[in-house]
Amino acid sequence: MLQPNDQFPSIAITPPDGAPLELPDALGGAFGVVLFFRGAWCPYCNAQLRAFQRAQDKLSELDIKVVALSVDDEATTRELIEKHGLTFPVGHSADARAVAQETGAFVNEDPLYLQSTGFVLAPDGRVVVSVYSSGAIGRLVPEDIVGMVRYVREHAAATS
């Protein structure tokens, strides 16, 4: 499992009809949120993705970028993006076992998918927070991330 201050591994996510994005470099030196979700079929995942979409204005104000990834195929991912009007990159066709090997995410074997896992990354690509779930619940929420990034920035400014 990735711990605070660990460097986030290089993982490619491929949005529908798009070129692969290499994490953490694709976050461009911003704070980042990386979400692994179970799939479009999961109501909790849908709720989490919608919540991050609703929070995009607040997240953007703080220069926080969001990316998500699942094992869903390209067509299913495209439908999910359209259904919820997601404007952040959502990758498809993840190799669940390879992602788990790199990050420590839990894998469901039958059917094969990644359990909900979330990371908050510092601008240098290091892990600030990691949240691992072995089931449907236990995941990052946008309000916590907004508050944490504000705190981290204020604390850094106070100690500079």
Image: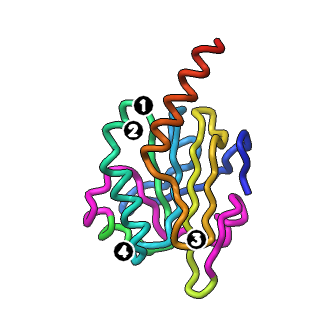
> Which residues make up the magenta segment?
81-108
Q: Is residue 129 magenta?
A: no
Q: Earlier in the sequence, mark 1 or mark 3?
A: 1
Q: Position of residue 59 (x, y in %)?
A: 39, 38
**Nearest to the observer: residue 106 or residue 112:** 106
**Mark 4: which secondary structure?**
helix
Left or right of 28 in this view: 106: right
Q: Where residue 62 is drawn, which disc sits there?
A: 1
Q: Give amino acid for label 3.
A: Leu
Q: Give amino acid for label 1.
A: Leu
Circle 4 Cα neighbour tier, 10 Å, few/some/many (<14 / 14–19 / ≥20): some
For the rendered model, the colour scheme is rainbow
Question: Which residue is under mark 3?
Answer: 114
Circle 2 Cα neighbour tier, 10 Å, few/some/many (<14 / 14–19 / ≥20): many
Mark 1 in CB contact with mark 2 (< 8 angstroms): yes
| 57 over 8 or under it: above or below | above
Q: Earlier in the sequence, mark 3 or mark 4?
A: 4
Question: Which residue is under mark 2?
Answer: 59
Left or right of 70 in this view: 110: right
